[in-house]
Image (spheres, grey):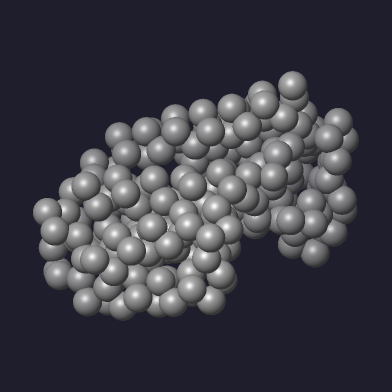
Amino acid sequence: MLAWHFLSEDKRLGYGDGRLVEVGQTLECEGEPALCSNGMHGSVRLIDALKYASGPIVCRVEIEGDVIESEDKLCGRRRTVLWMLDATQILHEFACQCAEDAMTLVERPDERSVAAIEAKRAWLDGKITDKKLDAAWAAAWDAALDAASWAAARNAAWAVAWAAARNAAWAARSAAWNASRSAAQDDARAKQNERLTAMVMEAHEKEGK
């Protein structure tokens, strides 16, 4: 079964396993597969895989052998990496877009939130330092803490605060989650999945040329 899986920057398995993952390689678990506790995991939707991401390396994988499925993940005995991509820049940009989506639902977004997204994009372009981004993140965090009780405003502010973070996986995962809470959640998550998948596939196709 085709699925998505994220790795940390060192491309090694987590949870004490430590094996290096390479394209074309098939890794197998010991014992019976069991969701959340044993087996080679992944998710059919990329947005669901992001929920469990340990880092920014996205892998297109095939999972086989006594496959067990749940709502947002699956596991089996074997997982083969078909291709992988460093999605750091993609995840940062995706986080910004999710935060902007959330802010469209707010009549008057906090200026600190608007500035944080601008700072994040400037940082991605190498125009400002880590220190300046961190300052923008701190201001966005304060804006989230100060947000009104109205759910859309509060969730939008948190989406921006997370989007301004320097860790790509955390930024994308948390911004997407808070943005989807600001809208009809199922529809929002489906749209996020379409967007993120398109961004990753475009980068993969360009890398292959």
Instruction: Find residue 104 and report its horizontal and vertical position in percent.
Output: 21, 47
- Nearest the viewer among 162 and 136 is 136
Taking the spot 52% from the left edge, 66% from the top edge, the residue there is: 128
Q: Quadrant of the N terminus?
A: top right
Q: Which residue lies at the image location 67% right of the left edge and 26% below the top edge?
A: 206
Q: Quadrant of the C terminus?
A: top right
Q: Residue at x 24, y 66 (%)?
A: 111
* Residue 204 position within the rendered picture, expressed as x and y whole percent measured from the top left: 67, 29
Q: Residue at x 59, y 27 (%)?
A: 202
Q: Quadrant of residue 150?
A: bottom left
Q: Is residue 205 left or right of residue 49?
A: right
Location of residue 85 in the rendering, given as x and y in whole percent from the top left corner:
70, 39
Residue found farthest to the front: 127
- Can residue 76 be seen here? The reply is no
Q: Is residue 141 above or below residue 11?
A: below
Please state which of residues 209 and 170 is positioned toward the viewer in this rendering. 209
